[in-house]
């Protein structure tokens, strides 16, 4: 039979309510109750199916009800929960999961790659909050061969319709044999609208293809396009601690 117990501080931290360290402090301060009784031992075993845990007066969402996953989004799917015009949305690709899940952040219609879903509001909030400045890594293929000065400008920041972009990591990976396109890896910490596309446009090169390959330490790996997989407890905890 599967193990139904988990250490109290891990149980709370994986819900996204607070970091593991903050959770431990609150437990020691008597601010955590299990089935209505304060528990002062961080390693106290929780039955994840039956115990009711409150953290600083707030009910911790039961583990069984929390879902965290990543999808390898193909181009051509809108990142929205529903589309009044009936166009394909990312929800179509996770239709066999509970309806309570939603995408964390957004990829453009034509952008591919790593998109996280959850039904855990605290987790989504943490991941999206600009103060956390989580790194997002993209692979992109652009028209032509941007020269060194264009790459330098991209690294330092360029002006796009929504403002000036912060310094970014931009690496030229390879030029196609016919010189018609160049592949780059781009790491940004912001989420301005169509940011990568507008950045390259600002230096005179249009994006042909764009794929997100990592969010923080979470990597897309070889997940096939159009498929999803659940995040591991380790991946969830690491994202929460970013
Ligand atoms: N930058 C873009 O231009 N589009 C995306 O979907 C994500 C980042």
Image (cartoon, rainbow, N blue to C red):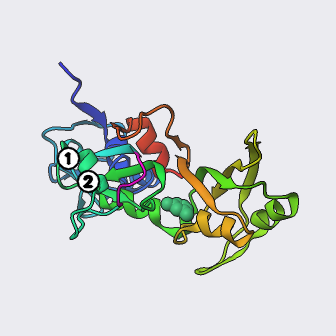
What is the residue that sits farthest to the top in this orientation? 1
Kindly identify the residue that appears in the image at 75 percent across and 49 percent down: 171
From the top left corner, tell me how far across and down residue 6 is, in percent.
29, 34
What is the residue that sits farthest to the left in this orientation? 50
Between 234 and 98, the one lying in front of the other is 98
Question: What residue would you read off at disc 2?
Answer: 91
- Within the magenta stretch, is there residue 100? no
Residue 202 sits above or below residue 240 on the image: below
Q: CA distance from mark 2 to mark 1?
A: 6 Å
Q: Quadrant of the N terminus?
A: top left
- Is residue 17 visible in this depiction of the protein? no
Q: Are marks 2 and 1 in contact (CB under 8 Å)?
A: yes
Say left or right for 63 vs 174. left
- For the stretch drawn in magenta, the main secondary structure is loop
Between 73 and 47, the one lying in front of the other is 73
Q: Which mark is residue 123?
A: none
- Within-10-Å neighbours for mark 1: few <14, some 14–19, many 20+: few
Q: To which quarter of the image does residue 191 belong?
A: bottom right
Q: Which residues fall within the magenta stretch? A: 73-78
Between 120 and 174, the one lying in front of the other is 174
Say left or right for 127 vs 163. left
Residue 136 sits above or below residue 93 on the image: below
From the top left corner, tell me how far across and down residue 81 is, in percent.
26, 62
Any atom of ligand 1 within 8 Å of the CB at mark 2? Answer: no
From the top left corner, tell me how far across and down residue 166 is, in percent.
69, 70
Kindly identify the residue that appears in the image at 62 percent across and 51 percent down: 140
- Within the magenta stretch, is there residue 75? yes
Secondary structure at numbered mark 1: loop
Question: What residue would you read off at disc 1?
Answer: 95
From the top left corner, tell me how far across and down residue 168 is, in percent.
71, 61
Kindly identify the residue that appears in the image at 43 percent across and 51 percent down: 75
């Amino acid at each position: 039979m599967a193990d139904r117990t988990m250490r109290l501080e891990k149980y709370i931290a994986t819900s996204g309510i607070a970091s593991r360290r903050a959770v431990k402090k609150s437990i020691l301060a008597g601010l955590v109750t299990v089935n209505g009784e304060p528990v002062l031992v961080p390693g106290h075993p929780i039955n994840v199916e039956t115990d009711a845990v409150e953290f600083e007066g707030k009910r911790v969402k039961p583990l069984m009800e929390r879902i965290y996953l990543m999808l390898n989004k193909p181009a051509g799917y809108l990142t929205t929960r529903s589309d009044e015009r009936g166009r394909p949305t990312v929800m179509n690709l996770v239709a066999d999961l509970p309806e309570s899940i939603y995408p964390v952040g957004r990829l453009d219609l034509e952008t591919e790659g790593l998109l996280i879903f959850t039904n855990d509001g605290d987790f989504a909030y943490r991941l999206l909050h600009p103060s956390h400045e989580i790194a997002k890594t993209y692979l992109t293929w652009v028209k032509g061969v941007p020269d060194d000065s264009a790459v330098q400008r991209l690294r330092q920041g360029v002006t796009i319709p929504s403002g000036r972009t912060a310094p970014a990591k931009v690496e030229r990976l390879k030029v196609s044999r016919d010189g018609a396109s160049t592949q780059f890896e781009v790491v940004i910490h912001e989420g301005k609208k169509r940011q990568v596309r507008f950045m390259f446009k600002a230096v005179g090169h249009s994006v042909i293809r764009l794929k997100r390959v990592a969010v923080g330490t979470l990597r897309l790996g070889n997940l096939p396009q159009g498929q999803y997989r659940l995040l591991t407890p380790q991946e969830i905890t690491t994202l929460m601690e970013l």
